[in-house]
Amino acid sequence: MNWKYYEPKFEYEEKFKDAGWPWAGHKYFAYDLIANIKPKKIVELGTHYGTSLWAFAQAAKDQKIDTEIDAVDTWKGEQHAGFYGEEVFEAVNKIKNEYYSDLKINLIRKKFNEALADFEDKSIELLHIDGLHTYEAVKHDFESWFPKV
């Protein structure tokens, strides 16, 4: 496979300015990854305001990739991201509806362990783990979700 590089315009940036957010530096790679491998099923564990989610979605939209994107998060926060109110989920849902409404994006408000039962083994082509960033938490997420990939 020849890897192709893109220079996308991220539509969501009109509503969410993420230049200073930790994940913003990776969004071009995330876009290229989706555009090049064209996965049918993407699951993201941990979304917060959605920089990675929107990069995946923008690639699917621009490249007309038939994919389903499931974002799993409580949208309440945790010790590294901090804790927050309903305004974060509302902002994510608004961006989804305004810019990516034609895509199959599911916002799943559950803890990662609770959402496991919603996915069959070997049903996920791309799993993005971005929850609590302790070694123990990431190891647990990897080991729990690996059979789903």
Image: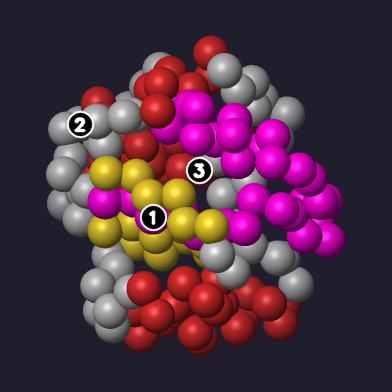
Q: Quadrant of the C terminus?
A: bottom left
Q: Which mark is residue 52?
A: 3
Q: What span is in magenta?
A: 68-96
Q: Viewer-proximal residue, 105 or 125?
A: 105
Q: Residue at x 16, y 33 (%)?
A: 64
Q: Which mark is residue 70?
A: 1
Q: Residue at x 62, y 58 (%)?
A: 74
| Among the 4 quarters of the image, the one containing residue 112 | bottom right
Where residue 102 appears, as percent x and y from the top left, is 24, 30
Q: Is residue 2 visible?
A: no
Where residue 60 appears, as percent x and y from the top left, is 26, 37
Give neighbour class at mark 3: few <14, some 14-19, many 20+ (Cα, 10 Å). Answer: many
The figure's colour scheme reads: secondary structure
Label 2 secondary element: loop
Specify whether residue 142 is painted magenta. no
Label 3 secondary element: helix
Please report contact status of discs 1 and 3: CB closer than 8 Å, yes or no.
no
Specify whether residue 69 is painted magenta. yes
Q: CA distance from mark 2 to mark 3?
A: 17 Å
Q: Earlier in the sequence, mark 1 or mark 2?
A: 2
Q: CA distance from mark 1 to mark 3?
A: 12 Å
Relative side of 95 to 37, left or right: right
Q: Residue at x 79, y 45 (%)?
A: 84
Q: Which mark is residue 63?
A: 2
Label 1 secondary element: strand
Please report contact status of discs 1 and 2: CB closer than 8 Å, yes or no.
no
Judged by depth in the image, the label closer to the viewer, 1 or 2, is: 1
Residue 114 lies, with reference to residue 5, above or below; the image says below
